[in-house]
Image (cartoon, rainbow, N blue to C red):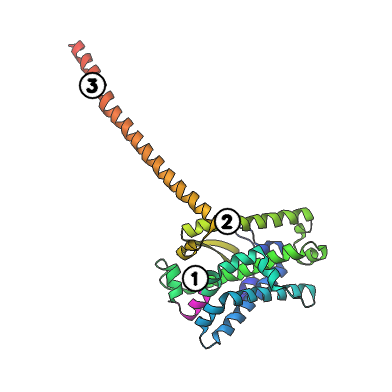
């Protein structure tokens, strides 16, 4: 995957990524660090006696450590000295919380299908649209994992470190050196995350849809694929259920409106063909009788 980072990361989607802030070289560095960390973690798990069971038990903890190490490596490289990130502080980050909740789909399932392309975990989520994991699908899921880790690192860095101008000067593109432009980007990025968590995510669950980001040599693309999310829906509580209730209400109302419009159109058609048809017939008959 490293070859993708060397050939460019131009944004090819309307979705905002934390990477968009960074200079091209810094983008490549962050993506490379995330790729190497995921590769290292997966390799270590494969060396365990029972890698699948180990991943099932320790998956969330390992995923958090992978994010933490990626963040530390990236910040250390930029500052030129060792940087340690507090695990509790990182866990409190909204982006970190969000992707940790998706540990199974984002981090564990790609590992399972590397072990076995017909993994039961894969079948439960992606069957019947995908009967087995093709190389392209595996690559797409790994791409998405790498980009989510990179965005998580950037979100944490934006919130915790970007008040320091020297930090922005080292990492960010020239148009984001302006505090106004930077704050606009930060607000838009945060708003995008909030709407994703509370609006788009529940909607995607309801539609059995999984939005992923794919890294290509020409840029970063977004793609929607099928995924059975019934398990996640059953675990939803509180405010996150409101979008689903709204969708169900909208579906119900739209169906009733369609039925009402159909009834009205049928009634109008009956009136036009039956009543007015007879009236026109009588008038025409009267005209004929008059001509006689």
Read off the magenta span.
109-117
Asked whether, in this view, residue 266 is left or right of residue 183, the answer is left
Q: Which residue is mark 1?
A: 137
- Residue at left offset 69%, top offset 71%: 88
Residue 132: image x %, image y %? 42, 73
Q: Earlier in the sequence, mark 1 or mark 3?
A: 1
Which is more toward the observer, 245 or 176?
245
Which is more toward the observer, 212 or 215?
212
Q: Are marks 3 and 2 in contact (CB under 8 Å)?
A: no
Q: Marks 3 and 2, Cα distance to the nearest angstrom? A: 62 Å
Asked whether, in this view, residue 26 is left or right of residue 211, the answer is right
Q: Are marks 1 and 3 in contact (CB under 8 Å)?
A: no
Q: Earlier in the sequence, mark 1 or mark 2?
A: 1
Residue 241: image x %, image y %? 52, 55
In terms of secondary structure, where does tag 3 sit?
Answer: helix
Which is more toward the observer, 135 or 226?
226
Q: Is residue 9 visible?
A: no
Q: Earlier in the sequence, mark 3 or mark 2?
A: 2
Q: Is residue 89 visible?
A: yes
Q: Which mark is residue 198?
A: 2
- Residue at left offset 68%, top offset 62%: 20
Q: Which mark is residue 75?
A: none
Rendered view: 227 above or below 112: above
Mark 3 against mark 2, which lies toward the viewer?
Answer: 2
Rendered view: 219 above or below 200: below
Q: Quadrant of the N terminus?
A: bottom right
Q: Which residue is mark 3?
A: 281
Residue 53: image x %, image y %? 50, 82
């Amino acid at each position: 995957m490293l070859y993708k980072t060397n050939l460019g990361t131009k944004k090819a989607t309307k979705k905002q990524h934390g990477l968009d802030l960074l200079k091209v070289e810094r983008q490549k560095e962050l993506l490379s660090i995330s790729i190497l960390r995921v590769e290292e973690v997966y390799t270590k798990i494969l060396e365990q006696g029972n890698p699948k069971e180990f991943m099932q038990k320790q998956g969330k903890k390992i995923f958090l450590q992978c994010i933490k190490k990626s963040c530390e490596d990236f910040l250390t490289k930029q500052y030129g000295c060792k940087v340690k990130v507090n695990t509790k502080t990182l866990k409190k980050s909204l982006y970190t919380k969000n992707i940790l909740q998706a540990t199974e789909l984002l981090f564990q399932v790609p590992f399972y299908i590397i072990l076995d392309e017909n993994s039961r975990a894969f079948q439960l989520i992606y069957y019947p649209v995908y009967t087995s994991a093709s190389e392209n699908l595996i690559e797409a899921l790994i791409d998405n994992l790498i980009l989510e880790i990179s965005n998580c690192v950037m979100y944490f860095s934006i919130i915790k470190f970007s008040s320091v101008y020297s930090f922005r000067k080292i990492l960010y593109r020239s148009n984001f050196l302006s505090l106004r432009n930077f704050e606009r980007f930060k607000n838009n990025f945060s708003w995008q995350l909030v709407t994703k968590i509370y609006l788009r995510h529940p909607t995607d669950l309801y539609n059995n849809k999984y939005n992923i980001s794919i890294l290509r040599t020409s840029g970063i693309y977004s793609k929607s694929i099928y995924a059975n999310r019934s398990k996640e829906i059953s675990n939803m509580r509180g405010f996150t259920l409101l979008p689903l209730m709204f969708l169900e209400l909208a579906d119900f109302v739209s169906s009733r409106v369609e039925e009402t419009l159909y009834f009205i159109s049928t009634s109008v058609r009956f009136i036009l063909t039956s009543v007015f048809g007879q009236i026109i017939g009588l008038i025409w008959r009267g005209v004929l009788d008059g001509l006689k």
